[in-house]
Image (cartoon, rainbow, N blue to C red):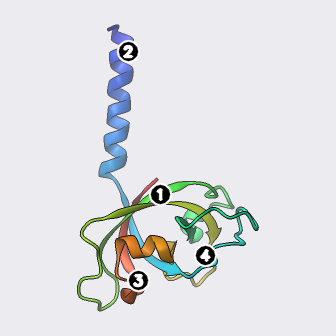
Amino acid sequence: MGIEMRILMMVGLVLCLTTIVHAAQGNAVYYEPPYSPSACFGKRDMGRWVAGVSEALWNDKKACGRKYSVRCIGGANKAPHPCRNGKSVVVTVVDFCQPPCNGILNLSQDAFDVIADRDAGKVRVEYNQ
């Protein structure tokens, strides 16, 4: 294998590891169905694994269609153990969470149920694009 290919592979590996190691953190809440219409896709049904994002990620609609892997890392309220054993879910950004948004991510109820106990209402999460 040529030296150029080896360098390219190493740069790719470093970028992947940097992305994994530096996951962003914030709070997540949930919203109930129906999940459309949405700010990004109007009346088009984008499925159950969707999310709205706060101003911090919205970037004037540039967030539309982005996918985030989201994992619960702890409670944001007084719920003692809200996370579901390190499970994660991948969601597609379809909407804008209007201020005052209680989380950086407003997950669909279906997505929230995968990673946390709905009774918690709000949890701390780690998320990667």
How far apart are the two marked residues, 3 and 2, measured between alpha carbons?
A: 45 Å
Q: Are marks 2 and 1 in contact (CB under 8 Å)?
A: no
Mark 4 lies on residue: 97
Label 3 and label 1: CA atoms lie apart by 18 Å
Upstream in the sequence, badge 2 or badge 4? 2
Disc 2 versus disc 1: distance between alpha carbons? 29 Å
Q: Residue at x 35, y 62 (%)?
A: 88
Residue drawn where x is 70% and y is 70% of the image: 38
Classify mark 1: residues with Cα within 10 Å, few (<14), some (14-19) or many (20+).
some
Q: Amino acid at mark 2?
A: Met
> Mark 2 falls on what kind of element?
helix
Q: Secondary structure at mark 3?
A: loop
Q: Are marks 1 and 4 in contact (CB under 8 Å)?
A: no
Q: Secondary structure at mark 4?
A: loop
Q: Amino acid at mark 3?
A: Lys
Q: Which of the two discs, 3 and 2, labels the residue nearer the N terminus? A: 2
Residue under numbered circle 1: 68
Marker disc for residue 5:
2
Query: Distance from label 1 to label 4 (Cα)?
Result: 15 Å
Identity, as a three-letter code, of the amino acid under mark 4:
Cys
Amino acid marked by disc 1: Tyr
* Structural crowding at the residue carrying mark 3, measured as other residues with C-alpha within 10 Å and reported as few (<14), some (14–19) or many (≥20): many
Q: Is residue 51 above or below residue 69?
A: below
Q: Residue under label 3, please give it.
A: 122
